[in-house]
Image (cartoon, coloured by chain):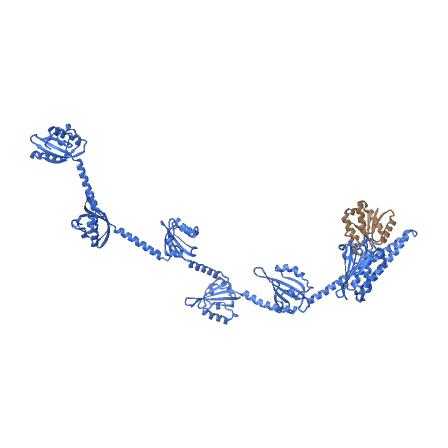
Chain colours: A blue, B brown
Amino acid sequence: MSSGVTSPNYERMVRYSLDIIGSIDRNGLIVYSNEACKAILGYSSEEVIGQHFTRYLHPDEAISATQAISETLASGKKVNFDTSFFHKSGHVVPIRWSGFWSEEDGLIYCVGRDMTDQVEQKKLLVEREQRFRTLFNNSPDLVFVESREGVITEANQQFLSVLGIVGTEAIGSPASSFLSPPMASVNEASLQQVFLGKTVRFDLVLEHNGEKSVYDTEKLPIKVEGKIVGAQTIARDITPMLHSYDTIQRQAQKLNSIFESITDAFFVLDKDWNFAYINSEAERQLGLNRTYHIGRNAWQEFPSEVNGDFYKQYHRAVETGKAVHFEAYFAGTDIWVEVKAFPSNEGLSIYFDDVSEKVRSRDELKKLSLVASRTTNGVIIMDRAFQIEWVNDGFTKLTGYSLAEARGHTPFDLLYHPEGDSSTIDTIKEKMIQGKPVSFEALRRRKDGGDVWMLVQVNPVLDDKSEVTQYVFIQSDITEKIKTKKELELLSLVASKTNNSVIIANKDWRIEWVNEGFTRLLGYSLEEAVGKRPSEFLHNHKTDSTAFNSLEGRLLQGNPISFEVLNITKSGEEVWVKVDITSLFDKKGELTRFVEVHTDITALKAKEEELTQLAQDLYRQNKDLQQFTYIVSHNLRAPVASALGLANLIPRIDKHTVLHDKSMVHLKESMQRLDTVLRDLNTILSIRDSKTSLEKEDINLKLVIEQALSSLQEQIIKCGGNVTVDVTEDTFVYANRAYMYSIFYNLLSNAIKYRSKKRILEVHVKCEGSAEKGTLIAISDNGSGFDMDKVKDQVFMLYKRFHTDREGRGIGLYLVKTHIEAMDGHIEVNSQPDKGTTFNIYLHKN
Amino acid sequence: MKIYIIDDDHLSIFLTENMLLLEYPTLEIRTYLSAHEVLSALGTEGSDSYPDIVFLDLNMPAMDGWGFLDELKQLHPEIKNRCRIFVLTSSLSLADSERSKDYAIVSGLIHKPLHQLDIKLVFQQKTIN
């Protein structure tokens, strides 16, 4: 630097130097300073020149600076020292001074360098070093540095304490010497990798005081300027983590095995109702499949359960945060399950237990106990010694004994009835002891002394070894049944032994049974009657079924009916019976049977007919009497009254008048009429009297008619009428000749008398019938006729006339009827006004 | 005074008519042989032909006296106030006289033959009324 440099150059160099270049005198007054002092300390050179340098010096360093100056003053040698100067703004600026005393100049030349940056950097470095060191030493991880040879060059406190060694032992020793052989080899292999530039991670297992610790270890190269100078190893203790992981694993395993081993079905639903866990029992019971169902939504998988019991209960659990416990039916696998569901933050844990059997048996038990307590039957539970342990209400009702009264007794003693068959009881006891179910009927005595017939069913209760432990009696009251049965026995006795004929027929009137009375009355045996309808074989043409037909409706409605009917026996005899029919219905109200009871009333009926005949006779005679009264009061008296009147009149009139003559004629007529009536009466009475001793003979009918016609010949010719007689020559009737003549004479005479004026008279006489059934003679005309409705009853009455314009006494038809009836015949009339009249005469064969 | 005699027996009519004429020669007497004839006469002639007194026989063919009374009541109810009817019958039956009381229109029952005393009573009754 000295060569080539001129002095003006020095000056310039000094002036622009970054360092302060200056000089002080012996006393320390500043003689010169370049411009750097402005940059470093804020003072210009003019400001500092002439000032004592200590003015800017930090007071703490005044002594050391003075010493350094004294030193150079004494030795003349260059001294270096660091001082702190105050900047013009007040902060401290570290400055390194270099100075030397020049005797010749009497000045100390000084060069001061601003050390601010260096000092700061150094400070930072120290701090960082300190920090790293602290970190290094206080790190919870094991940290050590190895050389290429595997020798530890640094190791932190944790390393030492874990290995239980001190720093001096570690430093300079190979790391392998502190490791187990397997670990040592792992470490060495790793070290080699690191020196190849790689970072290696491995688990380091250290044993200390018998405890194994696992460290997650990373070994990485330390590079200085690209060159690997060592290997740093950081090992973190992960033993607790491993432990907890282990624990978790173990616990999960444990839980799993718990879940698997519990007999309950168990599954977990997460917050979104997805299956999160399903144990194998749940798979089995609920038909779930872990691999399929886990992760799937329960309600989507089991849509039919939505809004069902499970749905509601689970939602309740989730909403309330409280566990639910319920029983429900799961249709999926047809089981009853008891469910406990525990809500948690994760969802629902659900335990299922198949209680189908329990539910079923509970239901069964419920039903059974209901049956046992509510049944109207008596139920007794006895121990092996037949002593009553329990009875139900039905028993109390049946026997009158309460449970308290019955307990401890045997039912055999308690309900003992002297008329009960004790030998039967012994047999029953024997069978019971053998464990056989048995049933018997017995007469028992109630508490109140009343009799009760019971049907008892005995069921022994057996244990596993088929030993009898208990007996159950079920008693039903059959008193009514027995009574009914006895009644029935009596009734059937009555039905079979009664004199009445009894028929039981099905609803179609087919006979199912008849009694002996039926056979006695009608001649048909049971075998002959069964299957037939009564109407098929018991009726003939005379049987009048109108009575039954009119009553049938009532019968079908369930009312018993009763009527009289003519039946025909097997041998053809007519039997009048009174019939009582009762219809039988089943519980549903449907007709099942008829019971028909016949009472023979033939004798009664004959009597009745006799009586009717008598009544009819009496009636007729009474009517005759009435007629006679009438005849006497009217017809007999009329001419008498006329005669009397005329007799009264005649004396009062002049004999020589026409009126007088007329009156005399009328008087005569009156007397003639009186005579006629008397003759009529005589005729009638004679006919009536002759009734019993009437002369009858076979009369040729045609001949008689012709005789009557010849008597009327003149009148017939006069009116131009025509009479046809349709009767064969050989028709004979057994009758009285005079009556027959009178009958035809009167009827034909009437036909002529009451002929129609509008047309020519036609009379037709016709004979029908045979000698067997009797004779029917019809006499029809086309005359004026009459209104049947008006005069029906009076046609044949004496002195009844229906025509005012024709002569007539009103005796003709009366005589006809009287004659016919005197011959046990019968006459009917049929007429229509202005059409004609027909008389039908029936005469018996004998 | 208008008198009707209804009787099927011409002999009885002759007697009644002449007995009446003997007592009251000026009577206007009509005679009918059947009840039908009277009804048809009343029907065609109307209320002008209503008689003052009727002598009615009971025992007649076709329509007897009772039948006539029934018909009259039906066909000419107003005749009741204009005319008196006497049953004139040969019957002595009590039943007839009892029955005649059932008919308000019947003023009395006379047994044939009609006597002058009866006639007097009939006409006196009339004058009294």
Total marks shown come to 0
The answer to whether A360 appears left or right of A649 in the picture is left
Q: Residue at x 59, y 68 (%)?
A: A490
Q: Say which quadrant the C terminus of chain A sits in.
A: bottom right
The answer to whether A303 appears left or right of A71 in the picture is right
Image-quadrant location for residue A518? bottom right
Residue A216 appearing in the image: no
Q: Nearer the viewer, residue A700 or A690?
A: A700
Picture layout, residue A44 above or below residue B116: above
Picture layout, residue B127 above or below residue A718: above
Estimate the x, y position of residue A642 in percent, counting from the top left: 86, 55
Q: Nearer the viewer, residue A658 or A835?
A: A835
Estimate the x, y position of residue A572 in percent, counting from the top left: 68, 68
Estimate the x, y position of residue A12 in percent, counting from the top left: 14, 29
Q: Say which quadrant the N terminus of chain A sits in.
A: top left
Image-quadrant location for residue A620? bottom right
Estimate the x, y position of residue A164 in percent, counting from the top left: 19, 51
* Residue at the extreme top of the image, as rendered: A46
Q: Residue at x 88, y 56 (%)?
A: A668
The answer to whether B114 appears left or right of A503 in the picture is right
Residue A117 appearing in the image: yes
Image-quadrant location for residue A569? bottom right
The answer to whether A448 appears left or right of B93 in the picture is left
Q: Nearer the viewer, residue A792 or A424?
A: A792
